[in-house]
Amino acid sequence: MSGAKDFLSAQLYLIGWKIVQSLPEKSAYKLFEKLGKIFYDRNGKSVQRFRSNLKVVKPTAGSQDLEKLVINGISSYFRYWCDTFRFPSWNKEKIIKTVTVTNENLLKDPIAAGTGVIVALPHSGNWDHAGAYFCAQGIPLVTVAERLKPEKLFQKFLTYREAIGMEVLALDSNTLPTLSNRLEAGKLIALVADRDFSKNGVEVDFFGRKAKMPIGPAVLSLRTGAPLITAQVSYNPTGIQIDFLGPLTPRIQGSLEERAKDLVQQCAENFEAGIGKQPEDWHMLQRIWIETGVANG
């Protein structure tokens, strides 16, 4: 039954992808706004989880303010999906014109110097749009993707991101050595790093609770010497805003593992600062805090 359900979900995604690309832009976004409202009204497990996550981010919010955040957050989440389905038709001019950036030198300087750079970011705003912005400027970008089921859907997302100009690696045991090689070639490594998929994540303090985040970006930085910076991507009326912070350096002396753990905690602190400013754009509809259950549920 699971295989059949996965196949049906994939087929619906693929059909939706074709339909949304063919619609006029305003009609497509209006459609997704309506779908988002239906999704919210159903109040399924994902919406309930999103609400509980936002409550942790904004613990002093009253019930009305919290619900407004949830509604805006679901709207942002469906905007991301509409962007994703329509993105293949965007030209370079539109991609670049719809992005504003602060501290862009934190990324561009090490690329120009040939050292490569590692960007860690949360599931916020449209990270594919952010990646496409740098690819459109001729900056080679490498990222890692969790394998989706069924394989057909994973391959669709792979093709989609490769069309943007990204090199996408499947998450496996060979990922870190391959990323190290790409850094030696002076490339940009962009890694979504606010939720651990490996079950070997580092425990961090995040919005006053314990969560687990991947250690990979920190280890990669310490082993290669490439700078580690963080990015916060959020939506604005005309596109996206990218804010860079860093570079991060260990605040403690010790083993590679101890220093890496400190860097992961610093990433968590930067994520917290960015998400706290515009929490509705943090598309975290899964469990993340250890206290609320298993970290990767």
Image (cartoon, grey):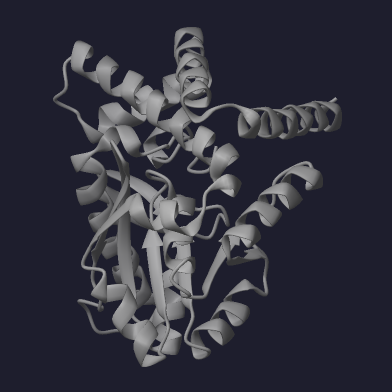
Vertical position of residue 256 compared to residue 114: above or below: above
The relative height of residue 189 versus residue 227 in the rendered view (above or below) is above
Q: Determine if residue 255 is in view.
A: no
Image: 135 above or below 209: below
Q: Residue at x 62, y 72 (%)?
A: 175
- Residue 93 relative to residue 10: left or right: left
Tell me the quarter of the picture where residue 18 sits: top right
Residue 168, image x and y in percent?
63, 64
Q: Residue furthest top?
A: 41
Quadrant of the frame with the C terminus: top right
- Would residue 117 appear left or right of 183 to someone viewing this image? left
Taking the image as shown, residue 154 lies to the left or right of residue 95, namely right
Residue furthest out toward the left: 60
Counting from the top left corner in percent of width and height, residue 15 is at 74, 29
Task: Specify whether residue 114 is in view.
Answer: yes
Which of the pair 165/229 is nearer the observer? 165
State which quadrant residue 49 falls in.
Answer: top left
Q: Residue at x 63, y 34 (%)?
A: 21
Residue that appears at 73% across and 27% down: 12
Q: Position of residue 152 (x, y in %)?
A: 80, 45
Report how many numbered discs are placed on residues in the image: 0
In the foreground, 263 or 227: 227
Q: Where is residue 202, by image quadrant?
A: bottom left
Estimate the x, y position of residue 114 in percent, counting from the top left: 41, 91
Which quadrant of the rendered structure holds the N terminus? top right
